[in-house]
Image (spheres, grey):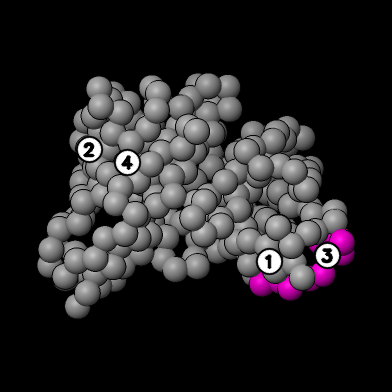
Amino acid sequence: EAQVTQNPRYLITVTGKKLTVTCSQNMNHEYMSWYRQDPGLGLRQIYYSMNVEVTDKGDVPEGYKVSRKEKRNFPLILESPSPNQTSLYFCASSSRGSGRGYTGELFFGEGSRLTVL
Amino acid sequence: SQQGEEDPQALSIQEGENATMNCSYKTSINNLQWYRQNSGRGLVHLILIRSNEREKHSGRLRVTLDTSKKSSSLLITASRAADTASYFCAVNYGGSQGNLIFGKGTKLSVKP
């Protein structure tokens, strides 16, 4: 079954304790992206990756890191989490499509609800 | 902001009625997409409409695009309680990244 898998689904942590949210897709997609969703703000892009070893900042990258060493995995790293990073996080992937940039539909994971105390 | 703007923010209707949601955007686009999100779950892609298309259908869904007005609408006909969800438009402005910019969504409630 085609899917994007995120772990953990729920996490409560404390300020400053490094954590990683994993994301894996089994569709051989080139494009992967992380979003955070907050009430009243919609989905905001954190980082994205057009392919292996190619990553770039989205709209709200501060406090986050990513890596793309393999095509299927795109982990999100919070080196020193703070309470303002409490949010619902989504990983998504897509095939590249033809031409420049992304053109196709995004496939989303089920989300990771993170609480930083 | 390049974000798409959905209207209304919330919509409550009875089962069997039609639901219409609108999305406006700022500059020329490559394509526009609609997604659905059940409470606290991941988003699910519904329809993609390209800038050279005016209308697309998928089951009970109808999407229109008016590039002169920079707007799109999503119509759900004969709504069901199971259609209760948030609906987001996402705009692809093209460019070297071609990232999708999501709006804040319309929360649809369909009462049985």
Give the mark nearest the N terminus, 3 or 1. 3
In the image, residue B14 lies at what x, y percent? 16, 70
- Chain containing the residue with disc 3: A
Classify mark 1: residues with Cα within 10 Å, few (<14), some (14-19) or many (20+): many
Identified by mark 4, the residue type is Cys
- Eye-nearest disc, 4 or 2: 4
In front of the other: A41 or B108: A41
Q: CA distance from mark 4 to mark 2?
A: 10 Å
Q: Quadrant of residue A47?
A: top right
Q: Which residue is mark 3?
A: A15
Bounds of the magenta segment: A10-20
Are discs 3 and 1 located on one and the same chain?
yes
Q: Nearer the viewer, residue A53 or B25?
A: B25
Q: Tell me which residue sits at (71%, 49%) in the image.
A: A74
Residue shown at 66%/72% (left/top)? Answer: A10
Q: Nearer the viewer, mark 3 or mark 1?
A: 3
Q: Amino acid at mark 3?
A: Thr
Q: Secondary structure at mark 1?
A: strand
Residue on which the image places disc 4: B23
- Left or right, B6 with respect to A10, comes to left
The amino acid type of the residue labelled 2 equals Thr
Residue A69 among magenta residues: no
